[in-house]
């Protein structure tokens, strides 16, 4: 019976939910809970604090991943130090989170990786809506497009970026779609009308 | 009756009839060459190719032709209309005119002039003019780049090609196309064996001349979209297409005439191989048998009726042809054309085979191959060939031996060139 | 380094031509548009214009529940949907603190490796086609078809499979799954030999790829390149080894690396990767543990507030998911770290001074998928 159903898994009601199928062994507790984020205090963080004292904010370990908050004032110095001294030579990702309603609205997120230590480190830079952020393109070439994307989606301005333009959306577009106050149905109707000649793209 | 014969006897009328036959046959050959290419490529690439129109897609070329004729004919804005119109016409004209000099059989050619080869080369080089004009007149980047590539390619490889032809002329002592074939009959050996290096150069240069893979840069799809004919559509596009495949047949014909004994059967002077003259009968018989076999294994049913009928008709036609060929005068008359076409198809098959096998050269590599390898090799080959001939004339050396020595020396040069220049 | 030149503001010299390659072009692999500034056929500079396929996947993620969003990730890199699904499901599992049971991890590994082979086959076919060899693409599709058939039998879909669920699997393997995979594996190596016979020693292929689009190891790291592009430059780094996920810590496999960082090396690396994937699949298929195929995580997924970054070695490179949870049923922020997007950034640097024909070869060797670049 069960076999027959599994041969046509695309039929909606056919496959039995997996949990019930081999129900024999006793189950672990129904809802696993991840470890709570805890303060992080290791060698690296201590070195960072010693060097940049007040610029290094809270350091946490969330789901076994290291997160350090860095103030934008000395952000570039911290990055330079991390890249050259601590060998975080690979910028995996650069993005942002919009905490709409918070005083400092954005968190700029940098995901660093070090080949020599096989270690990841996440930097968080709280930014106000009008705060400009220094660009890290001089340190990691990767940042070029990633910062453009951040600018495109969040409207975060990076000072010192060689070519800060929109990248995914067309140049004349108004608005930054990944901001929380930008509705999912919202679009630049004027742009759509002018360039596509249709009333709405929806 | 006599008047009719008299009219037919007029050289002009005779020529006209021959032109008509050659033109029709050529158009058909080109159409079915496209079909053959699609089928052979498909089988190389583990697929079937055209299967829908007619049995095994045999009517596909006709359907394609109709489709191309009925398609909308677009002239891009900003194109030079007159030149845009003229370009494909020039290309087609050039590649078809050159066929008037090709001897398809002992006594079947439109005309045979004493500077035949020169004329063929001159006319066939004109074809590229159409490509250049077409690329330029399109007023678009990709065609322009394609046209420029084509020009540079032609200039580079035409030289090597011409030098390769010269060594055949040296052996034959005549420029007349039929004369060259007859020279091969007299000397009892195809020139490809006397001058293998020249034959090889001609072969490679011919592929480059006809813009075929691995030298298909002027129309490299993945780089230049469609190259010089990007902006062409409908009838004009089909003219370019026609010219391209006609050019393939043309260079194959030249190579066959000059190096593979043209309309001669293999070993024309060996008596005991005379049974080879029955080859056409065997070929047509086999084709007919295959058609009948397919006919019996074909799915029955109303929707297959026409396809089955066509297969049957084809089988019957082939069988009738085979039977007809058994009649001695017909057999004798068919010999030249049969062997000529068979050799040409061998060449064309190689063209298609290469297309299914090789990646494409880059432009600078193509140029380097042309200027650094092919042209020096061709020149050296002509010189050594001349030396070999002089040795045999003046010192009475065995002709074949001295030519073979010359070829060996050329090969040494080729090895050196390959090491130094690549 | 890596600065995108602004072509539009430059005053053109007499001999310079601007050529728009794409978004409709046979070999830009989708809707990539590359604006080339040419001197004859030589590339002076280039600019990638992307976004033609932008669908706002990350924004959509914020308005769907965790389970609802899973099918969307299949549509980013649509030629490696299984890998995307694996990355996403594992990221959410990490966020939940759950772990898929062994059997699920084994099956995930097998399907993901098959997907890697399928993706590489597609890359090989189109790459060879770009360089003018038209036959390999048909051979590659022949093998890819076998893999897609296995996917279809397993979950009903061939391309955008949605094969995995958060917490494990939805479907048990079908009867004959092992046999199908083994049958595929049995033939596969000889098929790879066949492709290599056509290309690896081919003089034209070598001339077209060796020394073309060189990316040094330092540049590759600085530009964030990952996957075969990074390994082709000689950096021996593979997330399957660096941060093992699924069941990769259980199997033996080598990480092939190149030496010169040119197109030919990246070709060799990917060919070797197919063989290594084949090796992993063979090891895994013989040792699938029995047991449940899904962890108990409940019907409504409400991860505790927090964030997680999880990345896998997708066929194209490092595919990462950065998910921020605010404790509700929907992600607060969902970021996809697309390997194609980041790898595409090195294009300009790699093609300067080369010819148009090389541009096509380099685009091919980067193995980008525009659905993932634009998201």
Image: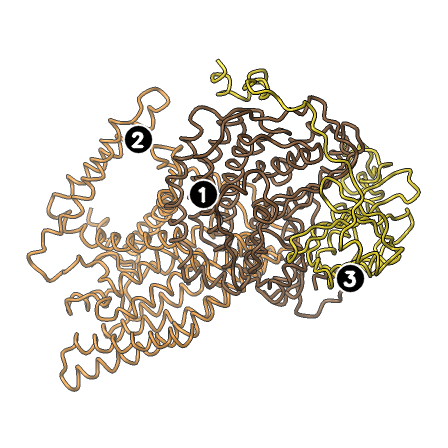
Chain colours: A yellow, B orange, C brown
Measuring from the top left, give residue C232's x and y in whole percent.
Answer: 54, 57
Q: If the image is split into quadrants, where does the C terminus of chain A sit?
A: top right
Q: Tell me the residue that label 3 is attached to.
A: A81
C375 w.r.t. B149: above or below:
above
Q: Which mark is residue C278?
A: 1
Between C288 and B410, the residue placed more toward the observer is C288
Measuring from the top left, give residue B187's x and y in whole percent.
Answer: 15, 70
- Picture quadrant where residue B10 is located: bottom left
Q: Residues within 10 Å of mark 2 (few under 14, many from 20)?
A: some
Q: Chain of mark 1?
A: C
Secondary structure, mark 3, is helix
Residue B276 in view (yes/no): yes
Labels 1, 3: front one: 3
Between A10 and C94, the residue placed more toward the observer is C94
Between C133 and B132, the residue placed more toward the observer is C133
Measuring from the top left, give residue C187's x and y in whole percent.
Answer: 37, 40
What distance separates the C-alpha of mark 2 from that of mark 1? 49 Å
Q: Tell me the residue that label 2 is attached to.
A: B310
Labels 2, 1: front one: 1
């Amino acid at each position: 019976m069960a076999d027959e159903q599994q041969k046509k898994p695309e039929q909606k009601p056919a496959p039995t939910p997996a949990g019930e199928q081999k129900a024999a062994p006793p189950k672990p507790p129904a809802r696993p809970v991840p470890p709570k984020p805890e303060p992080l205090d290791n060698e690296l963080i201590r070195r960072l604090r010693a060097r940049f004292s007040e610029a290094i904010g809270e350091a946490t370990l969330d789901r076994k991943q290291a997160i350090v908050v860095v103030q934008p004032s000395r952000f570039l110095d911290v990055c330079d130090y991390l890249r050259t001294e601590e060998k975080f030579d690979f910028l995996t990702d650069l993005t942002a989170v919009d905490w709409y309603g918070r005083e400092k609205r954005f968190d700029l997120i940098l995901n660093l990786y070090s080949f020599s230590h096989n270690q990841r480190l996440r930097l968080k830079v709280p930014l106000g809506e009008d705060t400009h952020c220094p660009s890290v393109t001089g340190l990691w070439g990767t940042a070029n497009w990633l910062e453009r994307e951040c600018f495109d989606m969040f409207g975060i301005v990076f000072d010192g970026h060689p070519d800060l333009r929109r990248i995914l959306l067309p140049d004349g577009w108004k608005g930054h779609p990944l901001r929380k106050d930008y509705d999912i149905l919202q679009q630049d109707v004027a742009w759509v009308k002018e360039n596509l000649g249709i009333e709405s793209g929806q | 009756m006599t008047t009719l014969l008299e009219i037919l006897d007029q050289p002009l009328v005779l020529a006209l009839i021959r032109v008509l036959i050659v033109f029709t046959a050529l158009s058909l050959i080109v159409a079915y060459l496209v079909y053959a290419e699609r089928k052979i490529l498909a089988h190389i690439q583990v697929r079937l190719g055209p299967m829908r129109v007619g049995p095994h897609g045999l009517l596909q070329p006709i359907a394609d032709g109709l489709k191309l004729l009925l398609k909308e004919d677009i002239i891009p804005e900003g194109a030079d209309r007159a030149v845009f119109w003229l370009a494909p016409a020039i290309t087609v004209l050039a590649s078809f005119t050159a066929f008037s000099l090709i001897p398809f059989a002992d006594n079947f050619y439109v005309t045979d002039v004493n500077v035949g080869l020169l004329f063929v080369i001159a006319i066939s080089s004109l074809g590229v003019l159409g490509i250049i004009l077409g690329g330029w007149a399109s007023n678009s980047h990709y065609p322009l780049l394609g046209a420029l590539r084509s020009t540079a390619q032609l200039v580079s490889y035409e030289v090597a090609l011409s030098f390769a032809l010269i060594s055949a002329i040296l052996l034959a002592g005549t420029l007349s196309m039929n004369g060259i074939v007859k020279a091969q009959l007299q000397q009892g050996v195809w020139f490809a064996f006397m001058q293998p290096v020249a034959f090889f150069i001609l072969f490679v240069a011919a592929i480059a001349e006809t813009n075929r893979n691995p030298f298909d840069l002027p129309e490299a799809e993945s780089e230049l979209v469609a190259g010089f004919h990007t902006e062409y559509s409908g009838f004009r596009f089909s003219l370019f297409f026609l010219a391209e495949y006609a050019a393939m047949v043309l260079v194959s014909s030249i190579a066959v005439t000059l190096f593979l004994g043209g309309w001669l059967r293999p070993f024309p002077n060996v008596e005991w191989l005379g049974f080879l003259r029955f080859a056409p009968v065997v070929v047509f018989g086999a084709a007919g048998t295959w058609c009948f076999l397919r006919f019996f294994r074909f799915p029955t049913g109303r929707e297959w009726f026409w396809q089955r009928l066509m297969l049957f008709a084809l089988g019957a036609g082939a069988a009738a042809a085979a039977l007809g060929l058994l009649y001695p005068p017909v057999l004798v008359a068919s010999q030249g054309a049969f062997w000529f076409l068979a050799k040409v198809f061998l060449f064309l098959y190689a063209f298609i085979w290469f297309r299914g096998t090789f990646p494409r050269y880059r432009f600078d590599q193509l140029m380097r191959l042309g200027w650094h390898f092919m042209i020096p090799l061709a020149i050296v080959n002509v010189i050594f060939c001349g030396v070999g001939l002089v040795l045999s004339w003046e010192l009475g050396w065995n002709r074949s031996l001295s030519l073979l020595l010359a070829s060996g020396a050329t090969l040494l040069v080729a090895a050196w060139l390959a090491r130094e220049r690549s | 380094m890596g600065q995108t030149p602004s072509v539009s503001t430059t005053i053109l010299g007499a001999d310079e031509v601007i050529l728009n390659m794409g978004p409709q072009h046979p070999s830009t692999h989708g809707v990539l548009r590359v604006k080339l500034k040419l001197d004859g056929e030589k590339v002076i500079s280039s600019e990638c214009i992307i976004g033609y396929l932008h669908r706002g996947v990350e924004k959509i993620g914020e308005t769907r529940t965790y389970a609802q969003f899973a099918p969307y990730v299949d549509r980013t890199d649509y030629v490696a949907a299984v890998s995307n699904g694996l990355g996403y499901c594992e990221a959410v599992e990490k966020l939940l603190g759950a772990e898929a049971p062994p059997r699920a991890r084994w099956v995930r590994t097998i399907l993901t490796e098959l997907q890697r082979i399928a993706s590489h086959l597609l890359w090989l076919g189109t790459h060879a086609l770009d360089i003018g060899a038209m036959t390999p693409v048909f051979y590659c599709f022949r093998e890819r078809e076998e893999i897609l058939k296995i996917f279809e039998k397993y979950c009903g879909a061939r391309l955008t499979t949605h094969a995995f669920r958060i917490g494990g699997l939805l479907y048990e393997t079908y009867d004959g799954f092992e046999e199908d995979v083994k049958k595929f594996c049995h033939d596969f190596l000889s098929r790879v030999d066949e492709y290599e016979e056509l290309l690896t020693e081919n003089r034209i292929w070598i001339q077209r790829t060796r020394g073309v689009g060189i990316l040094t190891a330092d540049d590759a790291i600085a530009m964030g390149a990952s996957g075969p592009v990074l390994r082709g430059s000689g950096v021996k780094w593979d997330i399957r080894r660096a941060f093992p996920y699924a069941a990769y810590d259980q199997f033996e496999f080598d990480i092939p690396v190149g030496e010169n960082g040119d197109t030919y090396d990246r070709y060799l690396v990917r060919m070797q990767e197919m063989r290594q994937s084949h090796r992993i699949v063979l090891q895994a298929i013989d040792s699938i543990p029995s047991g449940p195929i899904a962890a108990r995580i409940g019907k409504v997924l409400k991860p505790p507030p927090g964030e997680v970054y999880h990345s896998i070695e997708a066929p194209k490179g490092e595919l990462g998911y950065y998910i921020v949870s605010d404790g509700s049923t929907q992600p607060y922020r969902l970021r996809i770290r697309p390997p194609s997007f980041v790898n595409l950034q090195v294009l300009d640097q790699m093609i300067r001074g080369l010819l148009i024909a090389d541009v096509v070869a380099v685009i091919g060797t980067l193995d980008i998928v525009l659905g993932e670049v634009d998201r």
